[in-house]
Amino acid sequence: MVTAEKSQGYRATNAITATGIGTRIADTPLPISVISAELIADTGAFDVREVLNLVPGVLTNPRNESGVVIRGFSGLIAYRNGQYRRQLMTTWNMDRTEVIKGPAGIFFGAVRPGGIVNTVTAKPVFSGNFTDVKLMAGNEEFVRGEFFTNYVASKTLAIRVGAGGYRHNGEREFENREESYSGASATWKPTANQILTLDLEAINKKGFYLSSYPVRSLVNSKVFRVPGAIAAQANVNQLTTTADTANRAYLTSLGFSGTFGAPNFYPLYDMFAPYDYRWSMSNDALQIQRSRTVDLDYLLKLGESIVFQSSANYAFDNTSGTQPSDGDTRPYADGSLRFRTESFINIRESFNFDNKVTWRFSLGKTKHTIQLGQEYQRVVFTRPGYFNSVNNTYNNSPGNNTVAGVTNVYATRFIPGVSTPASVNALLTASGQTFNIRRWSYEEAVGYFLVDQIRLFEDRVQVLAGGRYNAFRLRTHFDRPVSNSSYSRFSPTGLANFDYGKGKGALTPQAGAIVKVLPDVGVFATYSESIEANTAIDADGNASEPIESKALDAGIKTELLGGRLASTIAYYKIDRGNLSYADTAKQLATGRSPYFIFGNSEASEGIETEINWAPSDAYNLLVGWAHTTKAETSKSNNATFVGRRFGGIPENTYTVWNRYAFRNGPLKNFAVAGGLQHNDATNLSQDPQIQVTLPSFTVFNLMLSYRFKVGERDYRAQLNVKNLFDKRYREGADGYFAPARTFYLGISTRL
């Protein structure tokens, strides 16, 4: 049986994500973090982002659920039940979240080197029929409800069905969010050696789109609110002149250099100036997200030593909306902004087919678990866009193109908190642009892997070693010829309706070992590699090599005091090469785009510590600390890039969460829990010339619960207060304001 053991409280003893076979965490030479369902419930986490804030070395973005950063590297690195997930990463029906650090290239193929996140959904059980119900209410008109029913149809068939939804109006202007969930899963055991599992999920989300906000503005201390600068810009035409251009002109008039990126344009104000986080540029920005997922897994046990697994997955994600865009991130001297509209539709369909054989056997005094696997993924991105007939270009966002005959597509002289928010739909109509072209991108990835997990010296030494071959293919099709395909320059007409990406594959090895120096203390080290498809193709048709990463992990794992004190301390070093950076100088010089500086490398290095201590059944303490000593560009053909630290990566982050449940006395059946999250201050931009500081913050959360009976039925009341002291703070690479203080009261029971 290839599953994970049920977590006990906050403590999980094994993880299925790391090796795919439910390996004990203490016996796996990889840093692994598991957030259990009970911990998720206690913290009142609604999104995976909130769950990940408990994991050292992981950074999240309050307004971008896909913006997860692990060990300095960001990207779409989320999985659901082992299959790639693009959006709507919520905690509906979640049994656990597992984070595997480092480039887990053997089991996950094309991955970012920092690690991966895998959420595991709850499945039907054969222990009985029951229905779990939970109702919640909170401030800002928050209401939420959910139910999950487990039904045992026979000795061989169990079914789980659930649904839920919430509505929330925030304190920001026009803010509103609503979401609905429905899901079903079934486990069928036609024979003692076979298991067939079907998992279905549908999520719909709609809300005011908060991602484009003037609160992210970078402002120049030599210009912003300076009377001379305001006077100099009094007659600036904001329709034709950007704030950057106007501000540079003023600085040049004072004798400063007008060169783009010159350091004398700084320092800048920090991120708390100048705007409050409540103000919006528009009153009708909207985002709609829909997700549909189907998982089908089959397991066949062939005798006592061989297991065959096959899985198929289909996922559909559709994100659409209209928002302010193209607004200057730097305001004019008087604090005003200009912006226009972006309308977008992004549809992603993925198809996955995986097969794996696991063979356990003994060879002399050694025990082996060999896995041979094949994986195939096909992803189709559909992106409707706007075809600009003036220059025959495709643009994926109608509304933010300059079109002949239409000049007033900007809202100008907009001052947050003073000006009346504009209608983005009216701006879109004024632009004269609409969806009139469609682009399809087809990505295919094939992987084959062979790995052996070896136990020797009476299980005191455990080795993981293997390799994986990955191959990629990318092609793009437009439903009409365009001038901005990388193959357009080879056409006699200067137009093409197709494009291709780099398809080179590679073999990625991984090897590691853990040695039990004491029965409950293990020392481990792992070397691993990973590869990512690089789709960067410049305007001349030049493509980069695939991105390759190498990583080393070394540390100590403990399971002391009968397993009540579990800890991991790990040192890591990661190198990531063949990266492509935008060559803005060449783009400006040639008037064509995109152009890239190829062959860049990045590196990160640090220490992570995680402790899970339960000295008694009543108390549990979780502590995490991550110290990032390096997160920077390590190699580039542009020397000014070398040594620059990634933006938004604090040197130190730490988290604490603890819970005490009263078992006796007048407070019997009460529980109290709380914790904190701290991030050091960090520079927001990778550009060393842009000194925009993301201030440090420490935010506290609280939980109180009480178990009681009404008649013969058990109930649990739970109060969560997030951001207990209403701290105004920013986090994430975009510097968004995190949510203000919120509180939720919930009642749950089992019927």
Image (tube, helix red, strand yellow):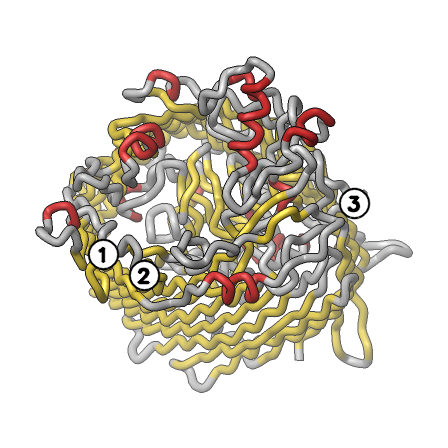
How many angstroms separate mark 3 from mark 1 (CA)?
51 Å
Tell me the mark number nearer the camera, choosing from 3 and 1. Answer: 1
Image point (41%, 53%), residue name: 401
Q: Position of residue 12 (x, y in %)?
A: 52, 49
- According to the picture, the residue beneath numbered tag 2 turns out to be 387
The amino acid on which the numbered mark 3 sits, given as a three-letter code, is Asp
Tell me the mark number nearer the camera, choosing from 2 and 3. Answer: 2
Image point (69%, 62%), residue name: 174
- Determine which quarter of the picture holds residue 536: top left
Image point (22%, 44%), residue name: 451
Q: Do the residues under discs 1 and 2 have CB atoms within 8 angstroms?
A: yes
How many angstroms separate mark 2 from mark 3 (CA)?
46 Å
The amino acid on which the numbered mark 2 sits, given as a three-letter code, is Phe
Image point (46%, 79%), residue name: 159
Q: Which mark is residue 482?
A: 1
User: Circle 3 sits in a helix, a strand or a loop, which is it?
Assistant: loop
| Rendered view: 197 above or below 470 | below
